[in-house]
């Protein structure tokens, strides 16, 4: 993000237009002057440059973000109305940010269908409109009602465009050890297996040496009763009897 040259443009030499110069160029652009249009775009590239700095932590290629930001800048220029009495930068900034965010969503490593993305974008537009209207965050039910869609579909769409977060994203730091997201997650399946392993190990400690040997060969080494009988030098019937006795004994402790 600290590159001097982006997409072949030397950012240290980008011009800055005054408000008077912008106004003069606007008049020429309205008359179809393409040279004035190019000059106006070049004169606002610093605006794009300042905006892509907000996305520095995403790990995206700054050249790509700069190009996408320029697309947003051009769209802002094409849709800007000088009669509204607002500065161009005020209008262009959200357009550029929106274009970059759309790019990050559409080209995310997790592919989302176009229909789901469209539903999510419409839901976000409705959400913003309702916030401006009522001054508070709307519920999923309110958004779903506005779009005439099931609330489950709205939730699914909004979740689908959420950007993935690294498990190594720090969430807390007290000057010592850093707490990461992965530290706050648990794998219930692995946790249960780990607990079961401890419980079984403790229970086997209450068996005699021969019973432990039989259970170890039968259930951890995968041997048959006949194979166990041959290995430890007793009959298969004795292996069966000792195995049942050991399991019954262990159940008292499990």
Image (cartoon, rainbow, N blue to C red):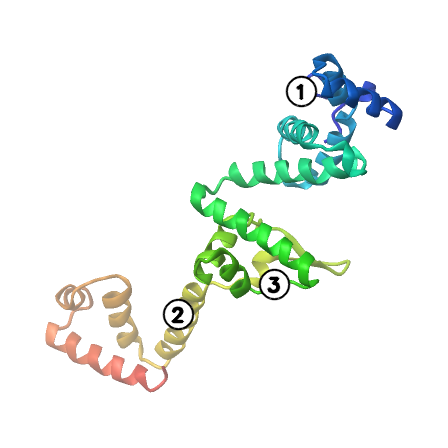
- How many neighbours does mark 2 have within 10 angstroms: few (below 14), some (14-19), or many (20 or more)? few
Q: Which mark is residue 138?
A: 3
- How many neighbours does mark 3 have within 10 angstroms: few (below 14), some (14-19), or many (20 or more)? some
- How many neighbours does mark 1 have within 10 angstroms: few (below 14), some (14-19), or many (20 or more)? few
At horizontal 45% and vertical 47% (from top left) the residue drawn is 116
Q: Viewer-proximal residue, 246 or 94?
A: 94
Image coords of residue 31 (percent x, y): 72, 17
* Eye-nearest disc, 3 or 2: 3
Is 185 above or below relative to 10? below
Image coords of residue 241 (percent x, y): 16, 80
- The residue labelled by disc 1 is 7
Q: Viewer-proximal residue, 200 or 37?
A: 37
Q: Which mark is residue 197?
A: 2
Asked where in the image residue 232 lies, by quadrant, the reply is: bottom left
Image coords of residue 123 (percent x, y): 54, 53
At horizontal 86% and vertical 22% (from top left) the residue drawn is 21
Asked where in the image residue 96 lies, by quadrant, the reply is: top right
Circle 2 sits in a helix, a strand or a loop, which is it?
A: helix
Circle 3 sits in a helix, a strand or a loop, which is it?
A: loop
- Tell me the quarter of the image containing the N terminus: top right
Is 144 above or below relative to 33? below
Q: Viewer-proximal residue, 202 or 103?
A: 103
Separation of residues labelled 1 and 2 (CA atoms): 58 Å
């Amino acid at each position: 993000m600290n590159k001097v040259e982006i997409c072949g443009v030397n950012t240290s030499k980008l011009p800055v237009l005054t408000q008077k110069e912008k106004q003069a160029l606007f008049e020429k652009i309205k008359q179809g002057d393409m040279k004035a249009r190019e000059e106006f775009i070049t004169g606002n590239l610093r605006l794009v440059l300042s905006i892509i700095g907000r996305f520095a932590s995403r790990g995206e290629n700054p050249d790509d973000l700069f190009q996408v930001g320029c697309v947003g800048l051009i769209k802002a220029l094409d849709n800007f109305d000088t009669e509204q009495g607002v500065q161009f930068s005020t209008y262009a900034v959200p357009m550029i940010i929106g274009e970059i965010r759309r790019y990050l969503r559409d080209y995310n490593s997790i592919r989302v269908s176009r229909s789901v993305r469209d539903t999510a974008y419409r839901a976000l537009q409705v959400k913003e409109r309702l916030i401006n209207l009522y001054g508070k965050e709307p519920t999923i039910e309110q958004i779903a009602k506005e779009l005439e869609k099931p609330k489950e579909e709205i939730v699914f769409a909004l979740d689908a465009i959420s950007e993935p977060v690294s498990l190594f994203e720090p969430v807390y730091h007290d000057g010592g050890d850093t707490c990461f997201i992965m530290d706050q997650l648990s794998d219930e399946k692995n946790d249960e297996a780990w607990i079961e392993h401890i419980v079984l190990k403790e229970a086997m400690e209450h068996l005699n040496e021969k019973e432990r040997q039989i259970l170890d060969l039968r259930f951890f080494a995968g041997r048959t009763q006949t194979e166990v009988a041959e290995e430890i030098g007793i009959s298969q019937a004795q292996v069966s009897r000792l195995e049942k006795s050991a399991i019954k004994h262990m159940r008292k402790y499990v």
